[in-house]
Image: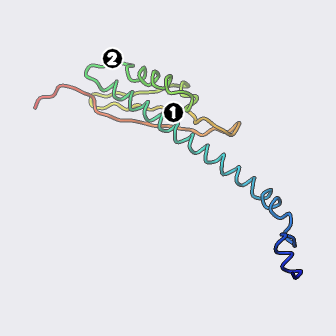
Amino acid sequence: MGRAARRRRTGGGADRGANPVELAVVMPAILVLLFASIQVAAWFVARATALNAAQSAVNAQRLYEAPAGAGEARAVDFLTAAGDWLVGWDQPGPACVTTLAEVTCTVSGDSLSVIPGVSFPVRQTAHGTVERWTTG
């Protein structure tokens, strides 16, 4: 058996030890991508939570002769039960603006962050018409 054939079979050569070095170079990029994807997913869940709270508030506030503050109370109940995906939502809290024909509710806060000291703001608004008697 020749020297070249023996080298191929035993795996020796100039590439010995290259895999650990390649892994050491690539691993930080893999970790950054992993944490970034987790952060993006947390941001999307926080947005969905804020939008669902705002829609719930609109549904409560748009009812016929709904008392003032019914929308904000429903949003607070929703956000309290939803968990900590949206943090800081209670400062200043959900806000609803009602006119004779329309209601608009806004929920804002920050996404849960996997990066210490960095915040990702979230603000969602829902809109609906107020139920009322009309002549037709």
The residue under label 2 is which amino acid type? Pro
Q: Residue furthest right?
A: 3
Give the mark nearer the N terminus: 2 vs 1: 2
Please, what is the three-letter code of the amino acid marked with disc 1?
A: Ser
Residue placed at 28% from the left, 24% from the top? Answer: 63
Disc number at residue 20? none
Question: Residue 27: x percent and y percent?
Answer: 75, 54
- The local crowd at label 1, few if under 14, some if 14 to 19, many if 20 or more residues have their Cα within 10 Å, is many
Q: Identify the residue at the far front of this view.
A: 1
User: Which part of the image, by quadrant, shows the N terminus?
Assistant: bottom right
Pointer 1: what residue? 108
Q: Is 108 left, or right, of 15 in this rendering? A: left
Task: Residue 73: name its quadrant.
Answer: top left
Which residue is identified by label 2? 67
Which of 73/9 is in front?
9
Q: Please tell me which residue is depicted at 32% across the width and 34% down the height of the picture.
A: 128
Residue 77 x %, y % = 45, 21
- Residue at screen point 44% across, 27% down: 95
